[in-house]
Amino acid sequence: MGLKSDEIVIRGGKPLIGRIEVRGAKNLATKAMVASLLGDTPSILKDVPDISDVNVVRGLLSIHGVRITDPARGEMILDPSNVESAHFAEIDAHAGSSRIPILFCGPLLHRLGEAFIPDLGGCRIGDRPIDFHMDALRAFGAVVDKSYNGIHLTAPNGLKGANIELPYPSVGATEQVLLTAVLAEGVTELRNAAIEPEIMDLIAILQKMGAIVNVEPNRVIFIEGVTSLRGYTHRAINDRNEAASWAAAALATKGDIFVEGAKQQDLMTFLNVFRKVGGEFDVHEDGIRFYHPGGDLKPVVIETDVHPGFMTDWQQPLVVALTQAHGVSIVHETVYENRFQFTEALNDMGAKIVVHKDGLKNVERRVARRDFEQAAVITGPTALHGADIRVPDLRGGFSHLIAALTAEGSRRSRTSASSPAGTSTSWRSCASWAPTSTSRAERSRPVGDQMTNPDAPLPPSLTRIRERNNTFGFFGRLVFPLLMLQASYEVHGKEKLPARGGYVITPNHFSNYDPLVVGLTIWRLGRVPRFLAKASLWKVPFLGWVMRSTGQVPVDRTGRTRNSDPVAAGRIAAQRGEGIIVYPEGSLTREPDLWPMRGKSGAVRLALEAGVPLIPMAHWGADKIMGRYSKGVRFFPRTHISVAIGDPVDLSAYRGRHLDAHEVAEATELVMTRITELVQTLRGGTPPTVRYDPAQHNQTEIGRFEQEK
């Protein structure tokens, strides 16, 4: 499978076998981010998925004055201390690709007394009218004014508790009421509320913040308003939709997938249908194994419904598996009116699916019929084949991935050009769920175009299989939390670090604290940091054992280890599929203003000899903790460190042939230029026009040059 821009090429026809870790639920993480607006102190949210909606909410929070930092991968600190109004044009620019902005109304009315909602976008699965939301906000006392560019809301008399009964147990409207009622004066009674696991997790967050929320039988929720709320620390519930999608993938491809983090209690209805179709599953303490046990799959009749019914998000990936069932299956879609668009592409691939846009009448039903519902009739089994298609929406996009993995031959998928803004990012996140179960030999190779061209820009990384190193993992868990107390980290270009396979990465070097910054960043991105380090460290008791067991590569001052050339040692490690960190400057930069100085050739020679990509890297801010040549470490105040990872340096002109000294120096200067460009993006300013050369200033190649107090 290869990724290029908003296009993915898949070669299927093989069982999907392996283990995957489910991510934090999209349907909780974005709402939890909005809830941070209600607190007087910062909130910490963990297991945040890297998807389009999260980025949209992040942007909206930022333009409203919320400061967001990322202390670790998948973790956010949200500080609402300086919430402020935003111009409608800024809101519109950020919100066009998501329905989440409507949930900002209650919190912003509490904080600012007003809120603005632009025209809403979202996946193309239906109109999703916002009347439920507006009616609920009016009940609290909000004044709703519609204009040409959106909806403006105010609360001239504040917001007060209300008695609200939803005509339908809408998840979004339930979230709206919860986020508004917790700070409203008095008691709010909500009837016919949604009770999805993500709703319960949001209630848990609000309770951590100081809210009083009682969940009663028969979809009734009572909320007692309080005068203030504090921040929260919370880990998002696991994404049950993603778990179900992987289960459907195992069924359709006759595979065997262990979904780490999947919870039986959240998937009860899906598991019953999965077993009826002919799939099997084993529930374990840390997840669920989904597999095709052999034999024919059976047809079923499904009616989507609100929780605890069969979720609408589950039907799309399962429909792909039903194309392989023997007989006629029927799916009644009762939640959204336009969620069968994805079946057009499946029919292009050989499926036999007929969509009845007005539903099927005169059939026995468990779920009450709705005016806009549709039905899909799937006849199987059908052999699927490759086809080029466009993706209509996020969940449908993952269904296309499953179909492509089931089909024989190649298939190319593209994001629809008419899709709402931001769907491209959602499609990338969909693609990131593609299989990562590989053999040891496959794990040692780069992904995508890197298999044949190490200088090609990396595709968006597939779901990462974290590199294992027990020693480094042990010490990392001890040391890295302390580093996070000293500084917050912001990493640009995370996707440019190869998810697997060998590489050489070349950071700038201006402080002895640098290796901690680089090591922490690499480890948070799922790779084990391995440095070319001083050979003398191997002679230190205990430290030498740590260096050996974590795979570091020794280099002595003569440029050689006792037994081998450091470039050769690094080459072997890179060819094993390990990443190597090389400081091309050789020592701390001597440039007076800390710009990168003249580089040495080791990194270039290692990348060329190993045939792996050379990735430039830069960071800025570590000097606030430990100055150049300083022995002291500053713990306060907490600072901010920015990191940037670039595309691989294009060394194609130098690969596959013998190079003279001039050509090696030329390639090295190319690397230093790329590093300098990254440094400039982080710190600003203008680098020197001539790169600093210690030899031209009568300075030695190694050791200290100046002392800093």
Image (tube, helix red, strand yellow):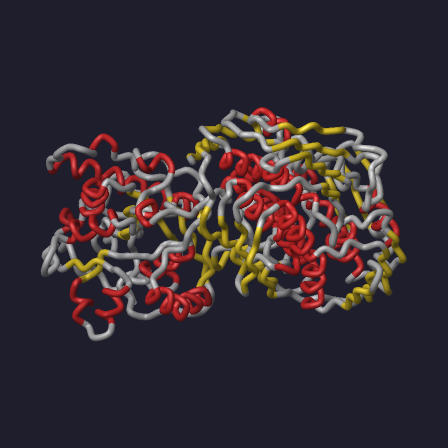
Residue 90: image x %, image y %?
64, 40
Can you name the residue that lies furthest to the front here?
295
Residue at x-position 83% and y-position 41% = 364
**How many marks are shown on the rendered structure?**
0
Residue at x-position 20% and y-position 50% = 572
Compared with 529, 417 (above or below) is: above
Residue 432 visible (yes or no): yes
348 or 653, which is in the foreground? 348
Residue 434: image x %, image y %?
48, 42
User: In the rendered view, does 56 fall on the left or right side of 589?
Assistant: right
- For the N terminus, give its image quadrant: top left
Residue at x-position 64% and y-position 65% = 231
- For the C terminus, give its image quadrant: bottom left
Question: Within the image, what quadrant is residue 476 found in?
Answer: bottom left
Compared with 604, 203 (above or below) is: below
281 or 486, which is in the foreground? 281
Question: Within the image, what quadrant is residue 318 found in?
Answer: top right
User: In the rendered view, does 412 fall on the left or right side of 587?
Assistant: right
Residue 14: image x %, image y %?
44, 38
Residue 335: image x %, image y %?
76, 42
Residue at x-position 68% and y-position 34% = 328
